[in-house]
Image: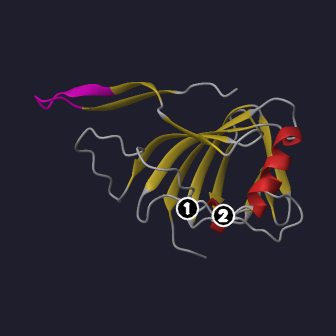
Amino acid sequence: MSKAIRRVVSGHNAEGKSAFILDGPAPHTYTRGPGSAVVTELWETRSTPADNRGDEDPTNHPYRLPPPRGGSVFRVIEYPPDSQRLAALERERSAHDDGSGRGAALDRGNPRHPGFHKTSSLDYVIVLSGEIYALMEEGEVLLRTGDVLVQRGTNHAWSNRAEEPAYLAFVLIDAQPL
């Protein structure tokens, strides 16, 4: 069971004063079913520099893996243990693309791990709790609570070999394709 993430967003009130415009559980959480990762969308920008005007929730749309062209996305992902997740990943590899971009990003031919994928983004990844292996085509590294990975458009996968979920925060920024 994933834990709800409280999202607090600042903005400006009708008088132009700084205020909190959103405060509560993040409303947009996605999963592909039992054993799959749980993605909680926290914020998104559609351009750089970002437009801080308005008070609409930019995450109010169907899930998509990559950030918008010229934009960014901030999310938290709960990775269940591989003992639960590997079967779900195999199902995803054989399924059609659901429009999220996840299917197009998958490396369906990589035998090391069924979760290998690649996006045209620069990703800042922070392990909030638990531990997880970051896998590259050549090599892997164990990341623990508080560790940070800068992921630069590489083909990669996540492997949770522990028996507890791992929670990772991601900031994905659109980048030139490699």
Judged from the image, the secondary structure of the residue bearing numbered disc 1 is loop
Side (left or right) of 75 relative to 130 = left
Side (left or right) of 108 relative to 163 = left
Residue ID at (79%, 36%) = 131
Q: Which residues are magenta?
A: 12-21
Q: Position of residue 168 (x, y in %)?
A: 65, 39
Which residue type carries mark 2?
Gly
Residue 55 within the segment the image draws in magenta: no
Residue 18 within the segment the image draws in magenta: yes
Q: Can you tell which mark lies on residue 99?
A: 1
Q: Position of residue 67 (x, y in %)?
A: 49, 58
Which residue type carries mark 1?
Gly
**Alpha carbons under labels 2 and 1: distance apart:** 8 Å
Q: Position of residue 12 (x, y in %)?
A: 21, 32
Residue ID at (45%, 54%) = 72
Asked if the residues shown at circle 2 and circle 1 are in contact, with their CB atoms under 8 angstroms apart, the answer is no
Q: Position of residue 102 (x, y in %)?
A: 63, 60
Give the answer, above or below, for where 176 lies relative to 1.
Answer: below
Q: Can you tell which mark lies on residue 9?
A: none
Q: Which residue is mark 2?
A: 103
